[in-house]
Amino acid sequence: MKKIILSLFLAASLAAPSLAATWNAVDRVPTVGKQVLTKNSLPSDTKFVVTETEAANSTSNANNELYISKTNLNYTGNDNEVAAVISQELGALINANASKKKLVSNITSAIAGSFVDTSLETTALAANELTLNNMSEKDQMNADITGIDLMIQAGYNPLAMIVVLGKMPGSTMDLLKSQPNNFKRSMYIYDYLAYNYPSKVKAGYGCQEYRNFTAYIQPTLDERNSSEKKLKKWEKEQVKLKKERAKQIAKYKATGGLNGWDASYTILKNLSENAEVK
């Protein structure tokens, strides 16, 4: 019996590396992407295109394509982390449709259409794309938490986004402070989840990168939890964030009919309203 058990163990050990080798982030994009779209009632005809260069998704795309950076996929190790990369791009696209950038986009497009000189028209359209494709830090963070809601609805572990950000190159400020990479964005995600979806934080994420992150932030959490003033300030910030997000979704609906993306309004509104903590 011992020989049989040993044989089975050895067979499983030999099989494990070959199974792991079959997983490929790029190959998983269509399946994971479809899951995120379907479970969130987003346009199912959206095509995912993996690019060698940095992804640049504008607020509208005649071909209904969503570009995913291969470089970002290189920081993933499982489907949860692939879902994080995809959801960040979806979050950016959804938020951009409701932001002030949409107004700037409309203005520059209108100006471009009034030019007789094609070179001036080209310049205006280039300014339009630059406005849409360059996100501020706050834009990125808000896109992250929109992506977090999409991940949860699709059945993926949202803490994977923290892990992916931790693997990506960080800012100079992170380095100077000896903080984890992209710490501000990661902490923004963690706080959002801790307030709105505490069960997700409690469930955790089984990898060393996440354990390192939680070990780093634990003193900050202990200090905050021991101070009624700091805790109330944090709760007030989360309530404000929740309201701001709901307002942005309402603005997104008001933009109307961009390639069918307004169809996602209802599900996004429900996500915002059905968090674990009101």
Image (cartoon, rainbow, N blue to C red):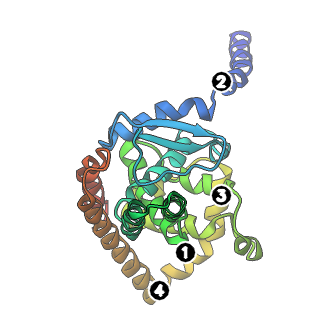
Position of residue 103 in the picture relative to residue 207 (left or right)? left
Q: 125 above or below 217?
A: above
Q: Earlier in the sequence, mark 2 or mark 3?
A: 2
**Camera-side residue of 253 and 120:** 120
Q: CA distance from mark 4 to mark 3?
A: 26 Å
Which kind of residue does numbered mark 3 sit on? Gly
Q: Locate the N terminus by quadrant.
A: top right
Q: Looking at numbered disc 1 in the image, what kind of residue is underneath it?
A: Leu
Left or right? Give the position of 231 relative to 18. Answer: left
To which residue does mark 1 refer?
A: 221
Q: Quadrant of the C terminus?
A: bottom left
Q: Residue at x 34, y 63 (%)?
A: 98
Residue linked to disc 2: 22
Compare marks 1 and 4 and give the one earlier in the sequence: 1
Are the two marked residues, 4 and 2, in contact with CB atoms closer than 8 angstroms?
A: no
Q: Residues within 10 Å of mark 4 (few under 14, many from 20)?
A: few
Location of mark 4 (residue): 230
CB atoms at circles 1 and 4 under 8 Å apart? no
Q: Earlier in the sequence, mark 4 or mark 3?
A: 3
